[in-house]
Image: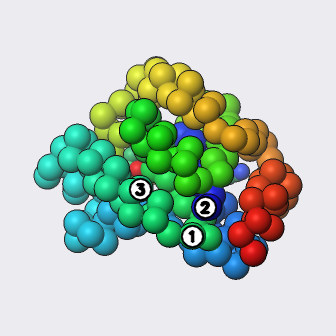
Amino acid sequence: MNIALIGFMGSGKTTIGKRLACQFGWTFLDSDVLIQEKEHCTIAEIFAKNSEGYFRKCEKSVLAEIAELERVVLATGGGLPVGEENWEILHQRFFTVYLKADFDELFLRITGDPTRPLLQKYPTRKHLKELYLSRLGWYERAHAIIDTTQKKLERILGEIIEHAYPFYTNQN
Ligand SMILES: Nc1ncnc2c1ncn2[C@@H]1O[C@H](COP(=O)(O)OP(=O)(O)O)[C@@H](O)[C@H]1O
Ligand SMILES: O=C(O)C1=C[C@@H](OP(=O)(O)O)[C@@H](O)[C@H](O)C1
Ligand SMILES: [Mg+2]
């Protein structure tokens, strides 16, 4: 069994995932980092040179690979939990934690970041909010939902550990 952090861009999956893995003594993996290593280019370059569709195929294949491992904290990309196929794997092999936050706060956290190509695809606040709203139903399938709005990292980490502790003790 593994733990997967899911949620929209800026929800803190990468930042908090590293801390959680460290706390549990598990391996930290980030699907975006694995894809960049395999493709030898950045996420922005993959979107520009190939396509978003190609990136989604890469996401599926790295998820299937990680699912074979044990004691991994996975920071997913924000679009990874969109689709039944990926959820089938997530539900089978991961305790899933949705890091939820108000759109306004997420927008402030990510705005202007050149590493997130969807900010160009959805160039206005209104377009990005539509994407956010369209994904909520997928994110809400998670085993645990933690609201991160206006919360410090330490507190979020504590709340995740409370929820995930039974899974952690089962594996150790
Ligand atoms: N709870 C939080 N409060 C304030 N800033 C945060 C919080 N969580 C993440 N951030 C900041 O938001 C940005 C995006 O975080 P990141 O971990 O990359 O999110 P994700 O991987 O979910 O896209 C980073 O600058 C990070 O420091
Ligand atoms: O929401 C998305 O579809 C994406 C989120 C990004 O990851 P973060 O959620 O870590 O920013 C990254 O996978 C890619 O830019 C696409
Ligand atoms: Mg991330």
Q: CA distance from mark 2 to mark 1?
A: 6 Å
Give x and y (percent) for residue 172: 75, 75
Q: CA distance from mark 2 to mark 3?
A: 12 Å
| Residue topped by disc 2 | 2
Which quadrant is the N terminus positioned in? bottom right
Q: Residues within 10 Å of mark 1 (few under 14, many from 20)?
A: some
Q: Secondary structure at mark 1?
A: loop
Going by the image, does 59 lie left or right of 16? left
Contact (Cβ within 8 Å) of mark 2 with mark 3: no
Q: Amino acid at mark 2?
A: Asn
Q: Residue at x 26, y 48 (%)?
A: 57
Going by the image, does 136 lie left or right of 56? right
| Residue topped by disc 1 | 70
Q: Is residue 81 visible?
A: no
Which comes before the other along the chain, label 2 or label 3? 2
Q: Is residue 98 visible?
A: yes
| Residue topped by disc 3 | 63
Q: Secondary structure at mark 2?
A: strand
The number of callouts visible is: 3
Which comes before the other along the chain, label 1 or label 3? 3
Give x and y (percent) for residue 165: 81, 60
Q: Residue at x 63, y 31 (%)?
A: 140
> Which of the pair 44/21 is nearer the observer?
21
Going by the image, does 56 lie left or right of 108? left
Q: Amino acid at mark 3?
A: Leu
Contact (Cβ within 8 Å) of mark 2 with mark 1: yes
Which comes before the other along the chain, label 2 or label 1? 2
